[in-house]
Image (cartoon, helix red, strand yellow):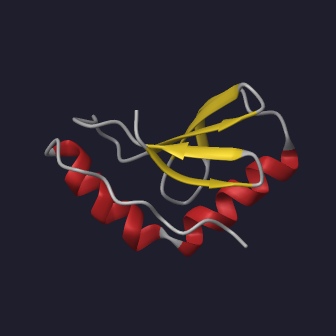
Amino acid sequence: MPYVSMFFGIIIRMFHNEHNPPHFHAEYQGQRGICNFKGEMIKGNISSKTAKKLIKKWAKAHTKELEINWGKAVQGKQIDRIKPLD
């Protein structure tokens, strides 16, 4: 699964040929979650409050890019990388 962004030990990914609702996958220290484009975890086991806060901050800053990537993913097209948090 291609990665979209990496920051502070968090890896953000999106699958090709994704299914609704629009989402991305986050991984942190072996824990995984599925998040909506607001950065809210809708499924998963990421327990770190700091990681969840950073994921939410990143998603809110890159909502438009996530939506564009989603369109590409559902069509099976190449997904673009998105700038990490600084």
Q: In which quadrant is the C terminus drawn?
A: bottom right
Q: Residue at x 66, y 59 (%)?
A: 56
The location of residue 68, given as percent across then percent down, is: 29, 64
| 36 on left or right of 74 | right
Of 68 and 3, which appears nearest the observer? 3
Q: Which is nearer the eye, 35 or 65?
A: 65
Instruction: Return the x and y of residue 70 as percentages of the image width and height.
Output: 30, 53
Quarter of the figure with residue 76: top left
Residue 75 horizontal side relative to residue 30, left or right: left
Count of numbered circles in the view: 0
- Residue at image position (75%, 49%) is 52
48, above or below 45, in the image: below
**Residue 4, placed above or below residue 62:** above
Q: Residue furthest left?
A: 75
Which residue does the image show at 73% across and 25% down from the upper left? 30
Displayed quadrant of residue 80: bottom left
Residue 28, horizontal then vertical, whole percent: 73, 37
- Quadrant in the picture for residue 83: bottom right
Residue beneath the point at 25% across and 46% down: 73
Q: Position of residue 3 (x, y in %)?
A: 47, 45
Q: Quadrant for the N terminus, please.
A: top left
Please say if 10 is above or below 81: above
